[in-house]
């Protein structure tokens, strides 16, 4: 859009020039319920959260890739978070971050692969269950992965995170929570 002098008007809400990124991947408030299965949440930028929970929200992430963000998963308030078999890498400040009022929040973290820093701060949710994590602070990351790992990652991303070598996918479809447009 141009002004009366023919000069371009840039909306100050959006940065001009360069790559534009979202502030957060998914933001949950009030009583939102979200189930993520075999998805990729990436590149929200430095300081941004891939998945952000507030108040009485519930998140279940299963077999997802969360990469290239400021923080992978942020929990606060009375939120509850279940993360199963996810791959969290290149989240600059940490895979997980507990907010200032997360003392009533809960996290169940089972069977995840975490490359890089595990927690952003020393603060933890009130209830945290961690089982069989594989944490590797040194990588692989986008910067030091081998050519074979890069090809495999690109193939997985092309197929939306599905492991094509697996002959069968198993999941408990009876316990899915419907996601509506409001929440």
Image (cartoon, helix red, strand yellow):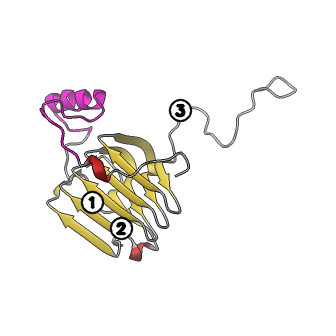
For the magenta stretch, what is the residue range? 142-171
Q: Is residue 87 placed above or below 18 in the rendered structure?
A: below
Indicate the position of residue 154 as horizontal and vertical percent values: 26, 28
30 left or right, relative to 108: right
Residue located beneath label 3 in the image: 18
Q: Earlier in the sequence, mark 3 or mark 1?
A: 3
User: Which element is circle 1 on?
Assistant: loop
Q: Residue at x 35, y 61 (%)?
A: 81
Circle 1 packing at 10 Å, graded few (<14), some (14-19), many (20+), is many
Image quarter for residue 74?
A: bottom left
CA separation in Å, label 1 and label 2: 9 Å
Question: Which of 155 and 43 lies nearest the eye of the viewer?
Answer: 155
Residue 172 lies in magenta, yes or no? no
> Where does the N terminus fall, quadrant-wise?
top right
User: Which element is circle 3 on?
Assistant: loop
Question: Which of 53 and 95 lies nearest the eye of the viewer?
Answer: 53
CA separation in Å, label 3 and label 1: 30 Å
Residue located beneath label 2 in the image: 121
Can residue 62 be seen at all in this image of the molecule?
no
CA separation in Å, label 2 and label 3: 30 Å
Residue located beneath label 1 in the image: 118
Judged by its main secondary structure, the magenta piece is loop
């Amino acid at each position: 859009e141009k002004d009366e002098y023919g000069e371009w008007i840039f909306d100050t809400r959006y940065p001009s020039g360069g790559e534009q990124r979202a502030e957060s991947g998914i933001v949950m408030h009030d009583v939102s319920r979200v189930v993520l299965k075999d998805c990729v949440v990436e590149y929200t930028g430095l300081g941004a959260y891939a998945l952000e929970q507030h108040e009485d929200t519930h998140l279940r992430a299963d077999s997802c890739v969360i990469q290239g963000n400021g923080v992978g998963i942020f929990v606060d308030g009375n939120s509850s978070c279940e993360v199963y078999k996810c791959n969290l890498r290149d989240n600059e400040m940490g895979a997980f971050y507990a907010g200032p009022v997360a003392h009533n929040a809960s996290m169940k973290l089972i069977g995840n692969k975490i490359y890089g820093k595990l927690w952003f701060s020393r603060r933890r949710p009130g209830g945290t269950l961690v089982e069989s994590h594989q944490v590797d602070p040194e990588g692989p990351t986008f910067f030091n992965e081998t050519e074979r790992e890069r090809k495999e990652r690109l193939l997985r991303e092309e197929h939306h995170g599905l492991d094509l070598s697996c002959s069968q996918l198993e999941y408990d479809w009876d316990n899915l929570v419907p996601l509506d447009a409001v929440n």
